[in-house]
Image (cartoon, rainbow, N blue to C red):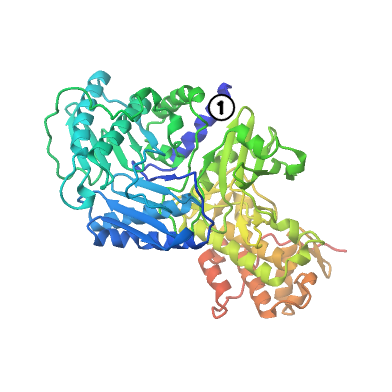
Amino acid sequence: MYADRPESCMQYLFLILCLALAVSFDYVSAVVCGDSMFFTPNGTYDTNRRLVLATLASNVISQDGYYNVSVGEGPGMIYALGMCIPGTEPQTCSDCIQASSKYLLQDCQNQTDSYDWSPPFCYVRYSNSSFYNEITLKPQYAEYYTGDIPGNVTEFNRLWEDLMRRMITATSSSTPGSPARRHYTVDMIPFTGFVNIYALMQCIPWISSEDCQKCLLENVRRQQNCCSKYKGGSVRRPVCYSLTDTSPFFGAFDNITLSPPPQGPLPQAPRTSPPLGDLTKKDGKTISTRTIVAIVVPVAIIVLLLALGFTFYRRRKSYKPMKLQTNDIFAADDDMTNTHQLQYDLNTIEAATDNFSDENKLGEGGFGVVYKGTFSNGTEIAVKRLTRTSRQGFQEFKNEVVVVAKLQHNNLVRLLGFCMEREEKILVYEFLCNKSLDMFLFDTTSRPQLDWPKRYNIIEGIARGILYLHRDSRPKVIHRDLKASNILLDAGMNPKIADFGLAKIFAVEQTRDETSRIAGTYGYMAPEYMNLGQFSMESDVYSFGVLVLEIISGHTSSRFYRIGDTDCNLVTYAWKIWRTGSYAAEEFVDPTLGDNYQIEQVTRCIHIALLCVQADHADRPKICKINSMLTSSKISLPAPHEPGFLVPSRRA
């Protein structure tokens, strides 16, 4: 159920628009994760799944574009299939299979049966049971490609039906040759002097002609039901796939000749096929945001808003709350894991948190309240419920959804989704039982739980997370608010960077930006950002240096120390001791550690931190260099220069 208030609708549309503008690919993969059976992550089945998917691309290429395999035994046994459309270049096929495999690994956390049609090139599926002789039409997945029909709608629909008629006939006929060619057709039909209607259909090779025709006819009816007002769309099922558009699908139309359209009505579906009126949203997989954002043409902003407004109004009453999968649109690294973004309805969130009961309250701040919740399937979540007067306004709320939707890494907190209904703005995260770093670091009772190995692991983990944001993610992200309270800890005390409300996306070649709105936390902000509004990767490095000093000392960056007649904050204190030449780690390290730490390792970490907080941003090391400094003691460290924000002397 969605909000009826116009302003809530406009905020929802604006959020979807921002998601849409994040990327502009024409077609992207659409992962469909099964929801009936689940496996234990990191168990035998998961290990076999990763093994099969890691080698699937090379096997598909070596087998002329089609390969099926089974690995393991008993509960750990997995069946997998990969195939590319006929004529796909080997490298293109390999890239497509690899990308689909990565999407499946990252999106389907523990589902035993999942598939991915990656238009227009390839298909990947895996399951814990053999599906080679199984004919199933669910779950299905439908989408439309935003853009009005470029001409007479009646004529367009007539030609489209003619094209679908002959496509179903051609595709359902078994074609001799390799398995990948048996049920595959591409075709087009002229519409105007400058516009053609293009179509692609494919069924799984082992399917019978009758079942292929049934599946494709259901796709056509589904597309008529959801997408008839738009220039194109696609419908995907476990055993068949169809796609139409007024633009040719790259690589699928290199060699094509027009065939005459047959006359007569569309083929009749077998009696087991449900009538058109029964093909509603409840039969299918809900639409993912990654596909929604990928099908929108960013330059057509006004058309987009009108189309989304109409869709929002029409579907509000007839559809279940829409799952918005806002996953990263770029190829994922192997470290990238887990989730897909979801638009949750308020009733689901209220049920998970026992209607935001005080017993489930985890914490409270200026932004609002954080609650622990549990979904009906047992998944634990953390729910951030923003108050109406929250300092994290709609801009920051939207920004967090847009940015974190693209980020998947072991050292970044997973945003599972969001909710915008009535007056509510809610963010849903993975639940981390140890809460945030500051609750351990700055609490005298909890601090002793952080021994030096744990602290060093936290320092390394934060550095890896920043490295991903700055170098490995696409897009590149500057966090702008790194601090102890934004570092969450899982059950193993592993750090996860959180709170991306102030984060900024950088272009590939971009190195700096500036703003007139200075936002962040005093004590962590670099001098060039604090004074001039300039931020960069180096400003995040500065914040990291402050964090390292806090982790070593057990004190906040704002705490004052006394050296002679001078009051110093944490950064200045570390620098002044260093300059006197009398530096010893024991003077700076947290007393609760006792003697249970490596003096050389602690001294090196303080040295690295001082390099990070140097006043001139050009002197600070890149995060990739910092990671190398932390992991290899053989790398020599230069002498640090003066840090920023030295506190002036003050007489006693």
Q: Is residue 306 left or right of residue 383?
A: left
Q: Position of residue 398 (x, y in %)?
A: 55, 39
Which of the image's four quarters has the C terminus? bottom right
Choose top left, top right, bottom left or bottom right for residue 390. Answer: top right
Q: Residue at x 58, y 61 (%)?
A: 541
Residue 30 in view: yes
Amino acid type at circle 1 is Tyr
> For this rendering, which residue is in front, 88 or 44?
44
Residue for badge 1: 2
> For this rendering, which residue is in front, 307 or 303?
307
**Badge 1 element:** loop
Above/below status of 34 relative to 549:
above
Q: Position of residue 194 (x, y in %)?
A: 19, 30
Choose top left, top right, bottom left or bottom right for residue 298. Answer: top left
Q: Position of residue 293 (x, y in %)?
A: 42, 39
Q: Is residue 627 left or right of residue 20?
A: right
Residue 296 in view: no
Q: Position of residue 454 (x, y in %)?
A: 67, 68
Q: Residue at x 32, y 48 (%)?
A: 133
